[in-house]
Amino acid sequence: MLIELNLLEKSYHKKIIFRNLSAKFESGGRYGIAGHNGSGKSTLLKILAGFITPNSGSISYSFEGNSRPVESIFEHITYAAPYLDLPVDLSFYELLDFHFSIKQRYKSISNKAINESLQLPTDIPIRQFSSGMLQRVKLALAFFTASEIILLDEPTETLDEQGFQLYRYLLETYSRQRTTIIASNKEKDFIDCISILKVNSYLNP
């Protein structure tokens, strides 16, 4: 999946978040989006996912040489972010079953195989998970879904060192040949990125 941004501008309540932002994300590449808190990293990621629209400019997607409308991008994308809600009354395995009733599993991987990496409890509701455990769940849903694009917003937020090593393992093992875009203000999150887009440089109040 190739993604191209052309002169994007986004503002909220007359405050410009960024403008004249152009970029290209080649199929199968790993990219970073850097910037301080409030610089527009999450906003840009949501635009890439089709969750929100820019005020001006254009974004195009092409898959195997064929243009795809933004309305159809959902089926090609997985998205992980600390602020995303989960159905907390479900157990981890129940959540996986629910999620994969909508999305396709990456290489038909089983619930048990997924949890061999995450080591999460399966007999309690997710509402009893710690913040770090919840972030592991969100990363698992992103990496173990069969999608051409993986979008990660602050992927190591709330993770301890062991959780960071899990993130590194998932990134290096399950993002190969998939377009992966990481938004973060932590340099260590940008593991082997082809390039890093600095959103700050497009701030033009």
Image (cartoon, helix red, strand yellow):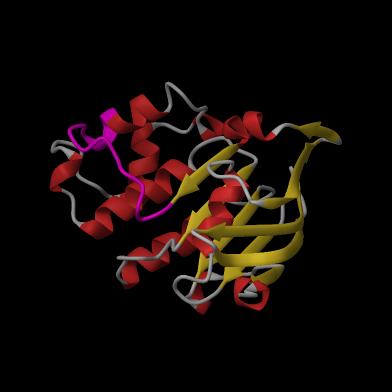
Q: Which residue shows up at 66% across the image and 78% down it?
A: 201
Magenta range is: 81-94
Q: Quadrant of the N terminus?
A: top right
Q: Is residue 171 visible?
A: no
Residue 87 magenta: yes
Q: How would you classify the magenta stretch by its main secondary structure?
A: loop
Residue 90 magenta: yes
> Viewer-proximal residue, 85 or 30?
85
Q: Which residue shows up at 86% across the image and 36% down it?
A: 65
In x, y percent, where is residue 190? 56, 70
Q: Is residue 6 above or below residue 36?
A: above
Report whether 120 appears left or right of 103: left
Farthest top residue?
101
Report whether 158 appears left or right of 139: left
Report whether 147 appears left or right of 96: right
In x, y percent, where is residue 198? 64, 74
In x, y percent, where is residue 114? 39, 41
Q: Quadrant of the C terminus?
A: bottom right
Q: Is residue 151 visible?
A: yes
Quadrant position of residue 23: bottom right
In x, y percent, where is residue 11? 57, 59
Q: Which residue shows up at 43% across the image and 61% down it?
A: 155
Farthest front residue?
14
Q: Is residue 114 above or below residue 45?
A: above
Q: Which residue shows up at 76% across the image and 62% down it?
A: 22
Count the numbered circles shown.
Answer: 0
> Viewer-proximal residue, 47 or 159?
47
Q: Is residue 146 above or below residue 7?
A: above
> Viewer-proximal residue, 114 or 52?
52
Report whether 37 appears left or right of 201: left
Q: Is residue 94 above or below residue 19?
A: above
